Image (spheres, rainbow, N blue to C red):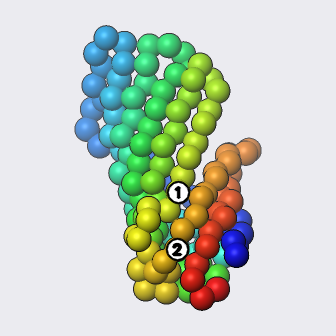
Amino acid sequence: MSFHATGTFDVKITPEGEPDAADGTSLGQMLLDKQFHGPLDATGKGRMLSAQTGVKGSAVYVALERVTGTLNGRSGSFVLRHVGTMDRGHPHLSISVVPDSGFGGLAGISGEMAIKVADGNHYYDFIYDLPGE
């Protein structure tokens, strides 16, 4: 049986090093620092790699993020895998729990997360399975 958690999060993205610009494509590295609010009350720490092409609206990012805190009262941690692409302004984002990355009360967790940004606010929508819930 799947469960559903929605809420908000704050994010700080810090560039790490200078972006590389070659042949119209720039490569970047960033540190992620998040605070999730709601049923997922946790911090997220991660690293992101990105590439922006010379074509307006086309880019990609990949990231790994360790989430540590509580989910509906169960304490522990897990890792999220992010892959996001923009194809001439058309976005596609896939965020999922890395298999077997759950620890503590979140051991065995699996699931998919969606994020939305509206009016400057960040929202998460997390569909997950957790043994014993």
Residue type beneath disc 1: Ser
Residue type beneath disc 2: Ile
Which numbered dot is residue 96?
Answer: 1
For the point 57% across and 83% down, the residue is 131
What quarter of the picture does the N terminus occupy?
bottom right
Decide: is 51 above or below 61: above
Q: Is residue 84 visible?
A: yes
**Crowding at mark 2 (Cα within 10 Å: few <14, some 14-19, many 20+):** many
The location of residue 53, given as percent across then percent down, is: 43, 19
Q: Work out how far the residue at label 2 is from the one at label 1, CA to CA, in angstroms.
A: 11 Å
> In this image, 84 relative to 99: left or right?
right
Q: Between disc 2 and disc 1, whose residue precedes?
A: 1
The location of residue 118, given as percent across then percent down, is: 73, 45
* Number of numbered discs: 2
The location of residue 73, given as percent across then percent down, is: 61, 87
- Residue at the front extreme? 1
For the point 58% across and 78% down, the residue is 130
Mark 2 element type: loop
Mark 1 element type: strand
Q: Can residue 69 be seen in this view?
A: no
For the point 45% across and 54% down, the residue is 81
> In this image, 25 relative to 85: left or right?
left
Q: Residue 67 or 105: which is nearer the viewer?
A: 105
Decide: is 115 above or below 5: above
Decide: is 96 above or below 101: above
Q: Residue 65 or 99: which is nearer the viewer?
A: 99
Which numbered dot is residue 109?
Answer: 2
> In this image, 5 relative to 24: left or right?
right
For the point 27% across and 32% down, the residue is 18
**Crowding at mark 1 (Cα within 10 Å: few <14, some 14-19, many 20+):** some
Decide: is 31 above or below 37: above
